Image: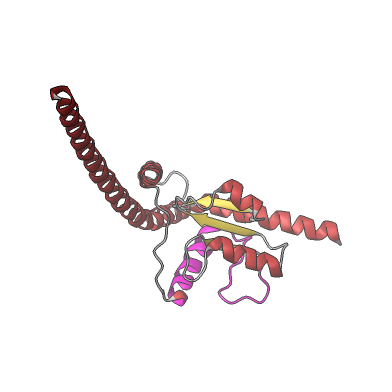
Amino acid sequence: MFGTWAECLERLEKNEIEKENLAKQLMQSQKMEALGTMAGGIAHDFNNILMPIMGYTELTLSNLPPGAKDRDDLQQVIRASHRAKDLIKQILTFSRQDENEKRPIEVNPLVKETVKLLRASFPSTIEFQEIIDAVDLVVTDMTMPKLTGAELAQKIMGIKPELPIVLCTGFSESINDKKAKELGIRAFIMKPVVMNDLATTVRRLLDERESFQHAAV
């Protein structure tokens, strides 16, 4: 009888220890989830800050003559921005959080500012217009109100399947380069977007589209 009671007490003690360990694991999991959410939010905010820094630094650099004394300083800013971009990727990978915050925005000022930056940054062979009748290419972000960039791309391709689409996004579990190509999206760019990379991509897609149109004639 004594042995039986001892076994019961031992099992009860083991059960209490297991409960305590599970509670600790749950608390740790909740802490890590909260930390990941916070890290993801900070990374996305930092991403939004870094993008104009990179864009306007590249714009200033492109306007300087060769040999200008400020070029080396601006190149240092670009290199530091790329290191920050890699750090953002690491933080977002840790957080495993998608860009899911949706809120209404005033589109017109954003479009005007974006067109202003792009027009100054891109070669003169690429023309930008704020209001256009014939669209030659679409650049979209993955995160937008009402629908994602991938959904927008599918709707556009349903109307005009030959139209090149560039999809920009931060870290996302729902889209990557392979999935984008499977959807028919012509180019996939991770944020923060480097203006030279975007310009090269746009130029390549427009040239490919023009070659295809000439071949079809």
* Residue 79 seen anywhere in this rendered image of the structure: no
Measured as percent of width and height from the top left, residue 2 is found at 13, 24
**What residue is shown at x 58% (from left), y 77% (from top)?**
131
Q: List the single residue furthest toward the right.
A: 217
Image coordinates for residue 105, horizontal then vertical, percent? 41, 74
Residue range in magenta is 108-136
Q: Of residues 92 and 115, which is closer to you in this image?
A: 92
Q: Is residue 180 magenta?
A: no
User: Relative to the observer, which residue lies in front, 193 or 177?
Assistant: 177
Can you say which quadrant of the picture contains the C terminus?
bottom right
Q: On the image, which quarter does residue 98 sit in?
A: bottom left
The answer, for residue 150, to whether it is visible in the render is yes
Q: Position of residue 127 (x, y in %)?
A: 61, 66
Give the vertical position of 15 relative to 137 (above or below). Answer: above
> Which residue is more in the foreground, 39 or 112?
39
Q: With 183 as the anchor, is 45 left or right in this view?
A: left
